[in-house]
Image: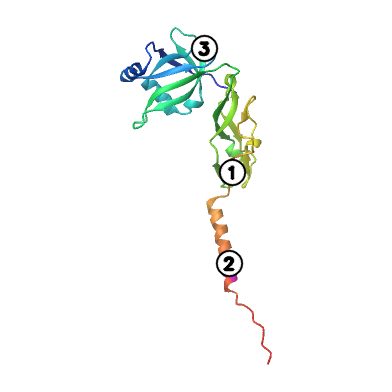
Amino acid sequence: MAGQVPDFEALLRTDTGKGAARQARRDGLVPGVVYGGGEDPIAINVPFNVLFKKLKAGRFLSTLFNLKVEGQEDVRVICRNVQRHVVKDLPTHLDFMRLKRTTKINLFIGVDFINEEECPAIKQGGILVPVRNEVELLVTAGDIPEKITVDLAGLEIGDTITISNITLPAGSKPTIDRDFVIANLQAPAALTSADDEDEAGDDVAADEVPATTEASEE
């Protein structure tokens, strides 16, 4: 189920061009542009500190925002690009795309594992090994899922979880056609080591058995 769409506040930028963008950065702002949706692009500025916190929080490029700009109608947007300084790696420009509620977009959605306490493999000391912490899905802008839920209840050591084992949110589907792996449940490291030692012991024992020879006839 989609969560509440967070607000993203920005300032309308009346001056455009490289000179205005440089001045915005000197003033502690990050310039950007909002485009798409059948409307003309608008130039905006975002306070650097506000943007930096959102970037640090993660999943900025896969989050749908309710963009609020004074003098403009609120619009749902998603950031399609964050340009960064080549040396300092700090944001220098943003590109936002307007979205309708029915727009289909590709987004990376995080994977959440639940019911570990009901998983026989983990109770036996097994290890959950995630292969993908997020999955790219084709979703509807008005119904973006917060996460993909993987239920571990009843899974045994050696089980593999693939995308076909997961019930995806309504209206979502993977962008990859094949049945790819999400996670594995592996045996405890100690048990694996013991098995390896047993196999090695068997090999040594076999090497120590003297070869039989046939008696020669005179």
Q: How many marks?
A: 3
Of all residues shown, which one is farthest toward the bottom? Answer: 218
Task: Identify which residue is drawn at 50% across, 19% down.
Answer: 97
Q: Magenta region, mostly helix, strand or loop? A: helix
The region drawn magenta spans 201-206
Q: Is residue 70 above or below residue 105?
A: above
Query: Which of the 4 image quarters holds residue 165?
Result: top right
Residue 203 tag number: 2
Kind of residue sitting beneath label 1 = Asn
Q: Compare residues 118 and 92 and report the one nearer the observer.
A: 92
- Dot 1 or dot 3: first in sequence order is 3
Q: For mark 2, give the secondary structure.
A: helix
Q: Compare residues 31 and 150 and report the one nearer the observer.
A: 31
Work out which quarter of the rendered image holds the N terminus and state it: top right
- Dot 2 or dot 3: first in sequence order is 3
Q: Which residue is mark 3?
A: 39
